[in-house]
Amino acid sequence: MSTALHQLDPSALESLVRAAVQRALTGGEATPGIVSNKPNLVVSISARHIHLTDEHVEKLFGPGKKLSPEKGLYQDGFFAAAETVMIVGPRRRMLPNVRVLGPTRKFSQVELAYTDAISLGIDAPVRHSGDIANTPGCVLVGPAGAVELSSGVIRAARHVHMGPKDCAFYGVKNGDFMSLAVKSHQCSVTFEDLLVREDAAAKLEVHIDTDEGNACDLDRAISIELKKQQPCKCHDH
């Protein structure tokens, strides 16, 4: 057994194993990565996925079709659906079998990692969820039809979900920014500008994408620290 695994406590090791199995079974969408010390912080790698409107669900999967929950996500009320679609970018570049997450939304949105966007030939900007003005679109292809999105393709900005007690513990509020330091033997990385998304029902969870998770070797991290990000102090000369 590696030195890194010897240094992990049993609960952290169990979390690593569960995360690896879940990613293998589900394609990697938003599954817990490492659980740190108090409070119960979970860092999840959120793989490429799609949010759809009710109208687009019916166009892609058939009249009267509803999303079929396959696996609950860490945040209560959210799920990975059994349904997947193909994303088609410029010059017919494609990503097949991209997972749909539920429940449905008022607008459709495609969330990619940087590598995914390059593969599709789409210049996707880094945006927080819901901020899709002036973003590129794509074509979605399902078993019953296709939908052409004029906008909605983004690279999801890293963020942290928090309840009121978690915000009080860290001394932050909705809209603040935090940093996440992930220490591993060879790939230690500190991520900045994690947007705080406070909700009364939220569990403490950081979302980073697959590129970021691979960059810090999250599955083999030996420590993780989340803290309030200090404002930039710039001086005029």
Image (cartoon, grey):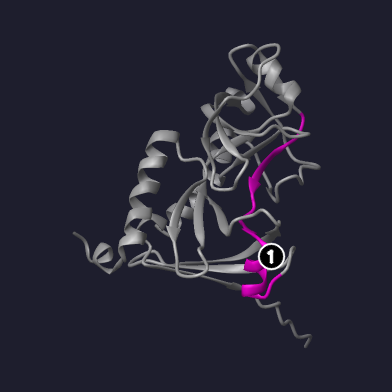
Is residue 91 left or right of 236 when viewed as pictured?
left
Q: Residue furthest bottom?
A: 237
Position of residue 177 measured from the top left corner of the image (x, y, whole percent): 68, 67
Q: Which quarter of the image is occupied by the N terminus?
A: bottom left
Q: Residues within 10 Å of mark 1 (few under 14, many from 20)?
A: some
Q: Which quarter of the image is occupied by the C terminus?
A: bottom right
The residue to which callout 1 is attached is: 164
Position of residue 218 measured from the top left corner of the image (x, y, whole percent): 42, 57
Q: Residue at coordinates 44% horizontally, 53% vertically from top-left?
A: 33
Is 168 colored magenta in this rendering? yes
Q: Amino acid at mark 1?
A: Pro
Image height of 113 relative to 158, above or below: above
Q: Residue furthest left?
A: 1
Q: Secondary structure at mark 1?
A: helix
Tell me where residue 84 sits by quadrant.
Answer: top right
Image height of 54 relative to 201, above or below: above
Is residue 166 left or right of 105 when viewed as pictured?
left
Position of residue 21 measured from the top left corner of the image (x, y, whole percent): 35, 42
Image height of 82 relative to 184, above or below: above
Position of residue 153 measured from the top left corner of the image (x, y, whole percent): 68, 38
**How many discs appear?**
1
Is residue 226 left or right of 164 when viewed as pictured?
left
Q: Residue at coordinates 69% horizontally, 65% vertically from top-left?
A: 164
Q: Residue at coordinates 66% horizontally, 68% vertically from top-left?
A: 167
Q: Residue at coordinates 70% horizontally, 77% vertically from top-left?
A: 232
Is 181 colored magenta in this rendering? no
Q: Identify which residue, 191 or 204, lies in the foreground.
A: 204
Q: Identify which residue, 42 or 183, lies in the foreground.
A: 42
Q: Which residues are magenta?
A: 150-172
